[in-house]
Image (cartoon, rainbow, N blue to C red):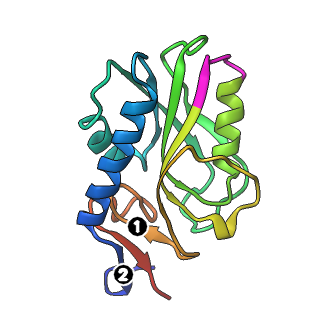
Amino acid sequence: MTNCQSQLKVLIRRDEIKKAVARLAREINRDYQGKRPLLVGVLKGSFVFMADLVRQLDLPLELDFVKLSSYGSAQESSGQVKVVQELETPIEGRDVLVIEDIVDTGLTTSFLLDYLRQKKPASLKLCALTDKSSRRKVAVAIDYLGFTVPNKFIVGYGIDYDEKFRNLPDIYAIED
């Protein structure tokens, strides 16, 4: 996909994203009132979403990041998930909220949630900007969801294709 730019179609505009982030922040502020959650961003895709989200949270919170690998440079997940960067913060007894850019087949997200559960958090919830539920292979409960997207490869707002297009302010579908 060398000339992808001409094949991009706007799927979700930045003003819609901004409204969804504000809605998610309100829900998280409500549910975590009186708590001090640890937000765990899944790198690299969640960083734009997470930055916008945390600026709207009115809670004492901490941040940490985990980096997983399952795609490489392909559009299809390899199905083999590995932890590339571990958490630095101990999570035992903590309220943990995972921040994810997209839940697709569910394989990577399910792997991460199982991995984190083994570390015995007090609670574990998932906030995803996008959900491509039509491709789900493993059931994943999303506690806070921005958008359900069609079965198309998407980029922008932190989501990439082979490390490209993360900087786009809207979310685009790559058209064949």
Q: How many marks?
A: 2
Which residue appears at 48% of the width and 15% of the height?
A: 89
In the drawing, does residue 141 fall left or right of residue 163? right
Which residue appears at 70% of the width and 62% of the height?
A: 136
Of the pair 26 and 88, the residue shown nearer to us: 26
Helix, strand or loop for disc 1? strand
In the drawing, does residue 113 fall left or right of residue 89? right
Across and down, in percent, residue 138 comes to 76, 54
The residues tagged by marks 2 and 1 sit, at their Cα atoms, a distance apart of 9 Å
Residue carrying label 1? 155
Across and down, in percent, residue 6 comes to 32, 87
Q: Quadrant of the N terminus?
A: bottom left
Identify the magenta region: 118-124
Of the pair 15 and 7, the residue shown nearer to us: 15
Label 1 environment density (alpha carbons within 10 Å; few <14, some 14–19, many ≥20): many
Q: Is residue 151 above or below residue 42?
A: below
Q: Is residue 3 visible?
A: no
User: Does 54 appear in magenta?
Assistant: no
Q: Is residue 8 above or below residue 169?
A: below
Mark 2 and mark 1 lie on one chain; the one further toward the N terminus is 2
Residue carrying label 2? 8
Across and down, in percent, residue 32 comes to 44, 25
Which residue appears at 70% of the width and 51% of the height?
A: 107
Occupied quadrant, residue 126:
top right
> At label 1, which amino acid type do we have?
Val
Label 2 environment density (alpha carbons within 10 Å; few <14, some 14–19, many ≥20): some
Occupied quadrant, residue 17:
bottom left
Q: Is residue 43 above or below residue 78?
A: above
> At label 2, which amino acid type do we have?
Leu
Q: Are marks 2 and 1 in contact (CB under 8 Å)?
A: yes
In the drawing, does residue 29 fall left or right of residue 76? left
